[in-house]
Amino acid sequence: MSVLKGKKMDKKQVQETYRETTLEEEQEYFEEVENELQCDLQTTQESIDYRNQAIKAQKKYMRDSHGDMDDEEFLQNMNNVNNDTFFIEHAAKQVDVLAHQIESPYFGKIAFEYQGDGQVLPVYIGTNGYWSMDEQDQKVYDWRAPIASMYYDYEKGEASYQAPDKEYFGKIVEKKQFDISNGRLHNAVDTDEKINDMILLDALGKNSGTKMKSVVATIQKEQNALIRNKTAYNLIVDGRAGSGKTVVAMHRLAWLLFNNRKTMSADNVMILSPNGIFGDYIAGVLPEVGEDNVPEKEFDSLMEEILFVDCDYETKLEQADRITTHPDMESPEMKNIAWKSSIAFYQAFNKYLEDYTENIKFKDFHFEKTEFTKDQIEKMFYNRFARYPVYERFEKIAYFIADRVEDEQDQAFTDEKHQKMENQITKEMIYQYAERNLIELYQDFLNSQAEQYPGIEQYRNEYGKVCYEDILAVFYLQIYFYGCKSYDNIKHLVIDEMQDYNIFQYAVLDRIFKCKKTILGDSLQVLYYNPEETVLDVLQTVFVPHGGTGGCQIKTLDTAYRSTCEITEFCNKILEADRASDEAEAHPLNRHGMEPVTEQAESIEDAAGFIAEKLDYGELDDFDNVAILCDDEERAFAMYKELEEYEQVTYLTNQSTVYNGGVVVLPKFLAKGMEFDAVFVINEQDVMENRISRHAFYISCTRALHQLYVINVTNQT
Ligand SMILES: Nc1ncnc2c1ncn2[C@@H]1O[C@H](COP(=O)(O)OP(=O)(O)OP(=O)(O)O)[C@@H](O)[C@H]1O
């Protein structure tokens, strides 16, 4: 009797009878699963058809007998239609999952021998799980199930997994990988670390595609630990370029949704993404594992939505432009950005705001004939409601005053009247005690710092707009005073490219999103890199534990999965001089390819000619995506115009929201988070000259999977 047939009769087997399965036995099991999946698909499809017919019939009946129907019967019919519609929506998703499962029901297997009773449980692991109703058996486990964690964490030998009830110990006695596609099992191999590495290298050697894909079959142990982390309130992942941070972010979201079905749906989760194209790039991952896509937002649109201060202000991109045009760290622009993003500035601002709040000149408050004394107001403001944002404290006090008015007038107010009165009182109190123009208040603070930091009082750019670094502080000021409740439904926030946010942005995010967070990025992938104060220092300043929540765990990822060994080593050298002594460089994988090529070109026309030649001679024909990265938008456009004569190229700008592959020209800063099979980096200035351009160069080069060309234009502007 085959082991697998044995399994059918008795789910767990005794270890002495266990032996590793043969390919024929695996084939048998595979066919069994496929048959059941096919049957399930057919039944589900039939039930959808049946419900569709039922809806049609119900609607017809309602139309025909509209006049004779009473309200109750009408409601009952509507309910039936709604129930059927809900069923169909749910079943349609199931059909998608089943169809995907029929193509490839699982990718791996472990057989786990439990400590103690010696029973062995074969665990087939797939992108989605499959429960057989016929056999009342879990034929395939979802990769996110607790038991499946062992597939990523262990080779054959001692192992354990944490189930909701307790930790189970035992031994993995068999571990297999399957080659399954188009509904056919091609091969089954017993794996060990070496084979895992080969399979990973094979996956990485493929072309990048235009959309990120799920990598559930090859998740690495260190990534798995982050995906399934349960202990961190704020999980911070500092990982080198290409180390799989976005992979971790997307798979962690999938894991969270799967393991918190009752309390969390896709609407309760949000991704803060660096730009519109990035959103398009990651959009396929969650649907691929059977989850709905989660909402994503850019910080600037969040700010636009919430900030009510009436002024013209710079965008992040306009600031990036200012940085690249004034890359000298000693220039007043750069000094200002550095100060105004520093921990010391943030702390000084907080101190200023605390002093301001502590010194509000309260006096007795009168509303209609009711009086609230200065003492009563102060007590509530500084004690009872001290943990709320300043203006929210006035709202809370207003509630009590309205109650007092109600008592003294000896009449019961309707809720509406009570609320109206609270609003009036709040407005009056703010007017009497704390009405301030936020920009002016900020300006006062800057003036108070001017002696120590000459030039700091300058907060508008050359076009009269409030600078980006200043508007972030003003945004913080607004949230400090008014708070913000619009995102209280979000239960988990993912922030990718964490290095791109400054301390005020984190402080704002911490107050708007009080939920747990996963924050990922690379402290080296910044334009302005300050080894004395990195984003990790900032995060540890903002995310301090309070009242049993908050705090952060910092984890690192050092292996560069994206690029070949040659490209990773080339990139490491760019930042050799900048990296802080304790900052790890990226570890290359043993995947080899062409050495990066450095070329000189006399002009942009020359550079375009070189690229066109490479494209024409078919050297890049095997690749799906080729990117040409230029210093800024203007230069990218000039290059696009040059290349247009030779090739079919696409120009990507900050406004682009879709990326369809092929040959694309884009500014370097837009390529963040993305990847391409081959990359041409065009340098129209000496990129190694200063820290800012070195980092921009580093970010650009790390986008390449297989081939990297650097073209230095000698006739520099
Ligand atoms: N375990 C894995 N199996 C297969 N591919 C992987 C794995 N981990 C990472 N990759 C691949 O490596 C590449 C880089 O991953 P990802 O984009 O998540 O890195 P990152 O750390 O976010 O990079 P960056 O910071 O440079 O944007 C992607 O193509 C991803 O699919």
Image (cartoon, grey):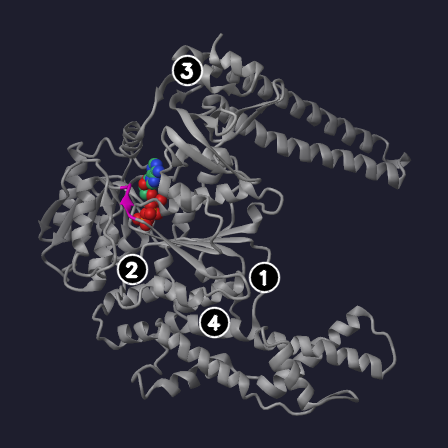
- The dot on residue 516 is none
Query: Marks 4 and 2: in contact by CB < 8 Å?
Result: no
Query: Marks 2 and 1: in contact by CB < 8 Å?
Result: no
Report whether 684 appears left or right of 31: left
Pointer 3 residue: 21
Pointer 1 residue: 486
559 in magenta? yes
Extreme top residue here?
Answer: 1
Sort mark 2 into few (<14), some (14-19) or many (20+) by Cα contacts within 10 Å: many
Q: Which residues are magenta?
A: 558-562
- Quadrant of ligand 1 in image: top left
Query: Is the CB of the residue bearing disc 3 within 8 angstroms of ligand 1?
Result: no
Pointer 2 residue: 526
Q: Position of residue 9 (x, y in %)?
A: 57, 14
Write the residue at 67% across / 89% down. 375
Mark 3: which amino acid?
Thr
Sort mark 3 into few (<14), some (14-19) or many (20+) by Cα contacts within 10 Å: some
Q: Can residue 215 be seen?
A: no
Write the residue at 23% across / 52% down. 585
Asked where in the image residue 201 lies, by quadrant, the reply is top left
Residue closer to the observer: 6 or 525? 6
Label 4 – label 1 distance at C-alpha: 16 Å
Secondary structure at badge 1 equals: loop
Mark 4: which amino acid?
Tyr
Pointer 1 or 2: first along the chain: 1
Pointer 4 residue: 476
352 in magenta? no
Residue closer to the observer: 309 or 101? 101
